Image: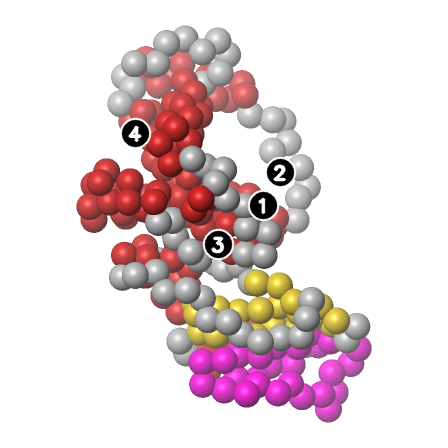
């Protein structure tokens, strides 16, 4: 039972105590949770497990409160929210900050529903390797296949799938993003390249050049007029 935490919402205390217990049992700074400077996607997937578990505990604590206790908890929570939580941030960065909490909680609930606390403890010993596995827990439970490596020139970066819903986790196979003097170049591996290419035609600016070949979709967003430009996708 949580005692008084001063002005801090008790649900937040429950969240942070969960992190302390996670670290005590699973060591959140080493082993499977050690920093991965060259694998941001895998690092974010592991963080989603950690934050998702704490969010799940926090949500279950709030659900256990009586009506009177809930009013007090909401009052503390409202008092702790910054006046401008958005801070004018770029939407992409906002989604990346929220991803471990929202997608992570959904992932933890799916794992718990499948095998209870025992399976969740196993997940902490073998965290998800990709954000796609977090978005689609069935992918994780089926063995969590690693993202497919898609070649691009040196200086490219792993892509992180932040799109929720629409089966994005089930279709995502891997990808790379490169930044060069001519603009951006992406190579995405998905289950249905034709469908993604068609969707991108409507979503990307007119300077984008799009091609696909089987499961590979290639996109080049040029700094200059793309007239006559083509992108190879083999």
- Between tags 1 and 3, which lies in front? 3
Q: What span is in magenta?
A: 207-234
Q: Which residue is mark 3?
A: 42
Q: Is residue 234 above or below residue 25?
A: below
Outermost residue on the bottom side: it is 228
At horizontal 30% and vertical 61% (from top left) the residue drawn is: 143
Please say whether residue 138 is visible from this viewpoint. no
Which of the two discs, 1 and 3, labels the residue nearer the N terminus? 3
At horizontal 41% and vertical 78% (from top left) the residue drawn is: 192
Of the 4 image quadrants, the one containing the C terminus is bottom right
Which of the two discs, 4 and 3, labels the residue nearer the N terminus? 3
Q: Nearer the viewer, residue 99 or 39?
A: 39
Q: Is residue 209 magenta?
A: yes
Q: Which residue is mark 1?
A: 94
Residue 60 circle label: 4
Assess disc 2: are there few (<14), some (14-19) or many (≥20) residues with their C-alpha within 10 Å of its C-alpha.
few
Q: Quadrant of residue 40?
A: bottom right
Drawn side of residue 126 relative to residue 175, left or right: left
| Residue contact at pointers 1 and 2, CB within 8 angstroms | yes
Q: Secondary structure at mark 2?
A: loop
Which of the two discs, 1 and 2, labels the residue nearer the N terminus? 2
> Alpha-carbon distance for marks 1 and 3?
19 Å
Q: Quadrant of residue 169?
A: bottom left
């Amino acid at each position: 039972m949580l005692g008084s935490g001063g002005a801090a919402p008790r649900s937040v205390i429950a969240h942070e105590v969960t992190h302390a217990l996670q670290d005590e049992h699973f060591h959140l700074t080493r082993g499977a949770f050690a920093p991965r400077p060259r694998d941001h996607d895998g690092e974010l997937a592991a963080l989603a497990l950690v934050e998702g578990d704490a969010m799940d505990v926090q949500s279950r604590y709030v659900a256990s409160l009586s009506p009177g206790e809930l009013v007090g908890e909401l009052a503390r929570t409202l008092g702790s929210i910054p006046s401008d939580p958005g801070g004018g941030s770029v939407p992409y960065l906002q989604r990346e900050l929220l991803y471990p909490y929202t997608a992570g909680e959904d992932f933890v609930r799916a794992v718990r529903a499948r095998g209870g606390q025992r399976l969740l403890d196993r997940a902490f010993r073998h965290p998800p390797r990709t954000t796609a596995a977090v978005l689609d827990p069935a992918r994780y439970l089926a063995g969590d296949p690693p993202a497919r490596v898609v070649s691009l020139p040196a200086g490219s970066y792993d892509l992180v799938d932040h799109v929720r819903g629409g089966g994005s986790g089930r279709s995502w196979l891997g990808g790379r993003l490169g930044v060069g003097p001519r603009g951006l170049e992406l190579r995405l591996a998905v289950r249905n390249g034709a469908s993604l290419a068609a969707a991108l035609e409507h979503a990307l600016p007119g300077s984008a050049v799009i091609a696909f070949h089987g499961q590979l979709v290639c996109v080049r967003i040029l700094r200059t007029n793309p007239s006559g430009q083509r992108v190879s996708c083999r």
